[in-house]
Amino acid sequence: MYLELFKLHELPFRLSPDPQFLYLSKQHARAKAYMESTIWFTDGFVVITGEIGAGKTTLIETFLRELQSDATVAQINQTQLSPTAFLQTVLVQFGFTPFDMKKPEVLATLNKFLTDQHIKGRKVLLIVDEAQNLSYRVLEEIRMLSGIETTKEKVLRIILVGQPELNDKLDSKELIQLVQRVRLRFHLSALSSAETSSYIDHRLEVAGSQGRRIFAEDTYATIYRYTGGVPRLINTLCDTSMMAAFGRDSDTVSAADLGEALRELQWVEFASRTNRMQSLSPEAIAAHADSAPAVGRILLASGGTTILERELRPGRLVIGRTPDNDLQIDSKFISRHHCQIVTQPDSCLIEDLNSTNGIYVKQKRVRRHNLNDGDVVIVGQHEIMYMDERASRLRQPTDLAEPALPPEGMPPEQGN
């Protein structure tokens, strides 16, 4: 391999989780702190979500490696199980052989084990990775396990880790009781552009670079553009780029090497492969805002009150519940990525992104809808009113004397 050429003692961008290489961005540090809080607090679940490749499993491995010896841990990674099989798997993690046990015996054994561990002063922790694949019935079994307690406190600490679909599942009406027991809930977002550069340098340093710059300065922005700050994608692209440099016997990865890696991987820019647009700096947002005239604008309302107004310029505006959206609506009736508005110079389209509750125009659920001036789209318990700026520019001044009333259910526009 290329270790000798780059003067490294181990591969810096392996895809397998390795706590030694963990880069603690602000997001990762916060998620890790939430995991650690389960050791001191037993009142409720901790839920950590993140996109594929965001570093969730590496966080778990780091957390487990740092646990003190007074903790007993069951770590479940296979989650497509029946309720009984799941409970049996938990018992296996605790050292039992429960495969001939019926469910009542499994539950009794678990109950006794947890109580005995508490009497011995040991902390018992259940960590479930890939929890988005758990069925509603298994999640209900986990909720019941969380209820085992002594006279003073619960005896089982629980961490659920999964992809963002876990949030949608937890927000369903079938799991209201479980959600009420969630104490901390955190979404692990992708790295920023600056964090992506630091992540690359950190992994190279751990692998033995000793401060040497292996990637040319002009490669970092391109790496971010094609990976979106997702750690696993960064690892794949960086490793392939280093192989390209190795092929020409160079100990520095150039922009040409990066381009060769992108052609080999057949990647397009991250924003073109996903509905989620990347976060921009305030300066970048300002620059973008001045780059093209507004095609339209939207008013977001809830309960008869206008919450915000947003201009629409050519591009994509993703709307959803989580902070990584362009427009966040923090409501349990809104899916993680609910819908998007695609604006072109001559048109504006709203499209449902396979949301749970859908989008409605004139009381009819639609998959996509070409927006016209004055249209109102129902999104969960919110309303989005579209105003066509092109139409307003074509109106005669006399039209302003009698403004049209907004559709029923939308508040009139407030004056300054």
Image: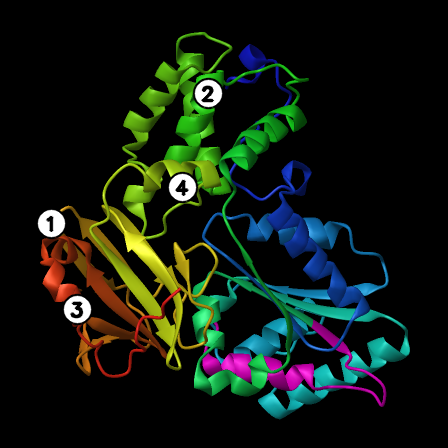
Q: Residue at x 47, y 25 (%)?
A: 220
Q: Is residue 9 left or right of residue 163?
A: right
Label 2: which residue?
242
Label 1: which residue?
346
Q: CA distance from mark 4 to mark 1?
A: 22 Å
Q: Quadrant of residue 178?
A: bottom right
Q: Quadrant of the C terminus?
A: bottom left
Label 3: which residue?
401
Q: Nearer the observer, disc 1 or disc 3?
A: 3
| Badge 4 amino acid | Ile
Q: CA distance from mark 2 to mark 3?
A: 66 Å
The answer to whether residue 182 is seen in the rendering is yes
Label 4: which residue?
285
Q: Nearer the observer, disc 2 or disc 1?
A: 1
Q: Secondary structure at mark 2?
A: helix
* Identity of the residue furthest to the top in this view: 249
Q: Earlier in the sequence, mark 4 or mark 3?
A: 4
| Badge 1 amino acid | Asp
| Badge 3 amino acid | Ala
Q: Earlier in the sequence, mark 1 or mark 3?
A: 1
Q: Quadrant of residue 391?
A: bottom left
